[in-house]
Image (cartoon, grey):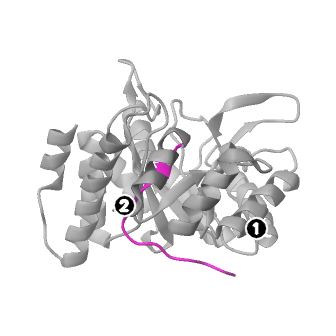
Amino acid sequence: MAEGSLVGAGIGLRLPHVQEILAAGDTDIPWFEVLVDNWLVEGGLNKKMLLAISERYPLVFHSVGLSLGGLTPLDFNYLKQIKALKKETGALWYSEHASFSGNAELKVPDLLPLPYTQEAVTHLSQRISQVQEFMGERMLLENVSTYLSCQFNEMTEGEFIAAVAQEADCYLLLDINNAHVTAHNLEQDIQAFMNSIPVERVKQIHLAGFHDKGDFLLDAHNHPVDKQVWQVFEHFIRRNGAIPSMIEWDSDLPPLERLLQERKIAADILTSATMGAHTPSVSRALVCG
């Protein structure tokens, strides 16, 4: 199975920023994550710009449309499009979520969590294995943000994610903002979740901002990374070493310069871990935020 590697801190590639990135020539951005659902087009300017980006920078693919944990048969036409574009752009890997988005009759525009049961572990692992066989490589599985706890859970979320990764032999995309949102909303200990994650399978990390709705946190990707998320990230990296990490910012998209300030904070934390020294990166996050 072909598996690539990345280093450093990247950002999510968003269409309003593409022309500025291409016009800038060389930048400090080492790689981009592509939300592939927005780029599955036949030709046109958007496709041309994506290919231009792929000639200059390494890419990884991320998607939200597979409903990986659902009961409806996997959409292999959708996966075929992703596989073809991945080959065309040279993207290093593909990631999806440990969630479902409805069934054959009802689709919802959200990533709904699965019950944390052995039955769900087996179901999700089997579907991941189908994806990996079709794609010809291991995929990355991402934890999602949650707002309610299932009464039928047999294990914690961290235990569930670890069990699926082991049974499916897949990699993980650890979303620390999602973990923080879930821990806050369900009044859980985020460090217990982080300690459950098999770090040897974590190939990428997501960092993002949430929207504080008062009664709960909403995973909205429309704010800077929160101080507490930076702290959890920094602790995890100092403990386990540098892992490719990136900033997700999807709603109320800021200027590219502002997004790169967030990226620089993550990059400094990763560099500090690589050099074996501690720098006050979280303090800088507060200044930038």
Secondary structure category for the residue under label 2:
loop
* Left or right placement of residue 83 versus residue 285 in this view: right
Residue 123 sits in quarter: bottom right
The front one of 20 and 285 is 20
Task: Tell me the quadrant of the picture where the N terminus can be found.
Answer: bottom right
Asked whether the viewer can see residue 62, the reply is: no
Is residue 217 located in the magenta-colored stretch of the structure? no
Residue assigned mark 1: 129
Magenta-colored span: 1-14
Quadrant in the picture for the C terminus: top left
Q: CA distance from mark 1 to mark 2?
A: 37 Å
Residue 124 to residue 250: above or below = below
Tell me if I can see residue 130 in this picture: yes
Q: Residues within 10 Å of mark 2 (few under 14, many from 20)?
A: few
Three-letter residue code for mark 1: Ser
Say whether residue 281 is left or right of residue 128: left
